Amino acid sequence: MFYLRLFENMEQCTEDEVQKLLPLVSEQRRQEALRFKHLFGQYTCLKSYTILHQLLVEHGLITSDCLPEFERNAHGKPELKDVAGVYFNLSHTKLAIAVVIGDGPVGVDVEGFKQPTQSLLEYTMNAQEVLRVQQAEHPDQEFATLWTQKEALFKYTGTGINSTIKELLSGRPQDIIMESSLNTERGYALTTVREK
């Protein structure tokens, strides 16, 4: 089992929409959302939860009246509390929200295109990847693709970004499926990672 839901209607990010979403989430998620000082953080926190909830209900994994709560592993990766055998991951940018669920570990990342600085390239990419970005016809798209692959893989493993970032892709496990795509019209890259 593996399902991806992509939401691109970010124009809905309004105060009114946040108020509509607040009663649709668990108390835990409501409190997390209200900790954000900015409207965008509140909205994406709430909207990603409602998308996750819809996916879980649609696939018969929870009932519609169940509002799942999260617990976090040692590295801070959220996991569903009291919903055994179901894994999820969330990601958002100003352009889209991505939610994945599966019956094994999953990771997802969505990132808008932006020109990377030289220092960011050197900090996050190995020499071969730096060259790949610099020589690409669209360096912003190449960087976004590589970055989402790394971030989704870190989220899949549940370790968070760490010192292995430069060599992460060259040493990635062979028992995973990693799929990347570009939405050049809307301006973002998306990568999902799951078990084979």
Image (cartoon, rainbow, N blue to C red):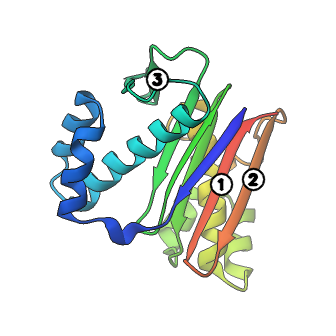
Could you classify mark 2 by the number of other residues whose Cα lies within 10 Å: few (under 14), some (14-19), or many (20 or more)?
few
- Indicate which label's residue lies in the foreground, 1 or 3: 3
How far apart, in angstroms, are the residues tagged by discs 3 and 2?
24 Å
The residue that label 3 is drawn on is 80
At label 2, which amino acid type do we have? Answer: Glu
Nearer the N terminus, badge 3 or badge 2?
3
Could you classify mark 1 by the number of other residues whose Cα lies within 10 Å: few (under 14), some (14-19), or many (20 or more)?
many
How far apart, in angstroms, are the residues tagged by discs 1 and 2?
5 Å
User: Residue visible at 74% across and 72% down?
Assistant: 132
Which residue extends farthest front? 64
> Which label was assigned to residue 179?
2
- Quick one: quadrant of the C terminus? top right
Asked if residue 73 is positioned above or below residue 13 in the image, the reply reads above
Judge from the rendering whether residue 185 lies leftward or rightward of residue 32; answer left or right.
Answer: right
Judge from the rendering whether residue 23 lies leftward or rightward of residue 122; answer left or right.
Answer: left
> Which label was assigned to residue 100?
none
Residue 9 seen anywhere in this rendered image of the structure: yes
In the image, 77 versus 2, the foreground residue is 2
The residue that label 1 is drawn on is 191
User: Residue visible at 52% across and 32% down?
Assistant: 57
User: Residue visible at 64% across and 42% down?
Assistant: 153
Q: From the top left corner, tell me how far across and down residue 189 is, in percent.
A: 61, 66
Secondary structure at badge 3 equals strand
